[in-house]
Amino acid sequence: MDDLFNFTVFLPVIGVLEVLTIVLSILFMHYSAKYRNQQLSLAWYICGVLFGFWTLIIFLIKRKDFPGPNTKVCSQCGKKFADSFQICSDCLIELPTINEEEKKKEKKLSKVFGILIIIMLIAAVTTGIIWGATMTDSIIDSLDDMSIDYIERIPVDGIYYDKTGESYNDDQSVLLYDKDGKIYSFSVEEVVNEEDEFFSYNEYYYVSEDGEKYFIYDCYVTEDGWFYCDKGGLLELFEEDTSSMTEEELDEYYNNLMELYDKEYKYYDYPYADNDGNIYYRADEASWNEKGELITAENDIVK
């Protein structure tokens, strides 16, 4: 499950659940207060909208101070009386009657909304856990992707070759050679984060016979297939100079590019060049055929 799906599905679902929880909390507080002969002030509703579930927690704590379902409250002085009283002893006005049917309805509605709140909370927590699990899987997959070997060589009939024509069953074992006869082999080293081992990662090198390591992104091969290390970072992606081309030459050039894009293998369409115009290819992508020829657009093995 990709990150886009996580954000377009889980995030709206959690948002809807949160809104429903807020609405249900306000309804629960409303009917629960009415059942206990306590009218909610506007402040409760505003806090319910602004703070949601936290307002409900405070309400549940304060609810014990409400008059109660069998208590009459004087509308003028606010004094509380038992159900048997008919007149306020201080104000001498008639106390409101308690409607038993209305109380049953209010009690039932407060229970219904209370149960729905619990359901919404369980749904929200479950959705959050699932989202967290998918995000964790996504992070782990990303770390795994970071650990994928960068070798992208082209096999010939399932076999990989090096510059000498030596064959290999896997692309990681392919050796590189420089003009002096040195041999370079691919190497992977795990780097462990001392503070958190979970975030370990791999670094990739080519290692010479004498043990010297060359970071993979500094390693290239020349047009002749020899190993070359660009430690100074001087190489740049090669760009054809089209400024002096005629309109017909430009059309032919771009038509050729379009044909190359249709090929199964096209990594060599992106060579690198130095200031003198010499062409290089990334060492981890460089591939040879059984004759030891570097596979380029001219030596493409795709039929």
Image (cartoon, rainbow, N blue to C red):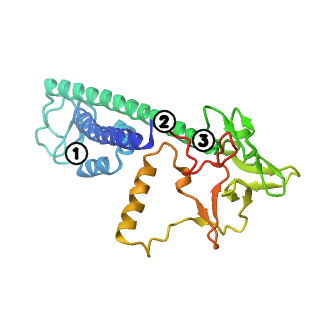
Real-space CA distance between mark 3 and mark 2, rounded to the nearest whole angstrom: 34 Å
Q: Is residue 144 left or right of residue 172?
A: left
Q: Nearer the viewer, residue 2 or 193?
A: 2
Q: Earlier in the sequence, mark 1 or mark 2?
A: 1
Dot 3 falls on a residue whose secondary structure is loop
Q: Is residue 281 left or right of residue 116?
A: right
Q: Marks 3 and 2: CB-CB under 8 Å?
A: no
User: Relative to residue 97, is residue 156 drawn left or right?
Assistant: right
In this view, the residue in front, 73 or 113, is 113
Q: Foreground residue, 270 or 302?
A: 302
Instruction: In the rendered view, tell whether residue 202 sits above or below residue 269.
Output: above
Kindly identify which residue carries mark 1.
78
Residue, disc 2: 134
The residue type indicated by label 2 comes to Thr
Q: Which of the marked residues, 1 or 3, is nearer the chain's N terminus?
A: 1
Query: What residue is at 67 percent from the left and 56 percent from the top?
Result: 217
Q: Badge 1 local density, few (<14 within 10 Å), some, or many (20+)? A: few
Dot in front, 1 or 3: 3
The residue tagged 3 is 154
The picture places residue 189, in percent across and down from the top left corner, at 75, 45
Residue at image point 58% right, 39% down: 140
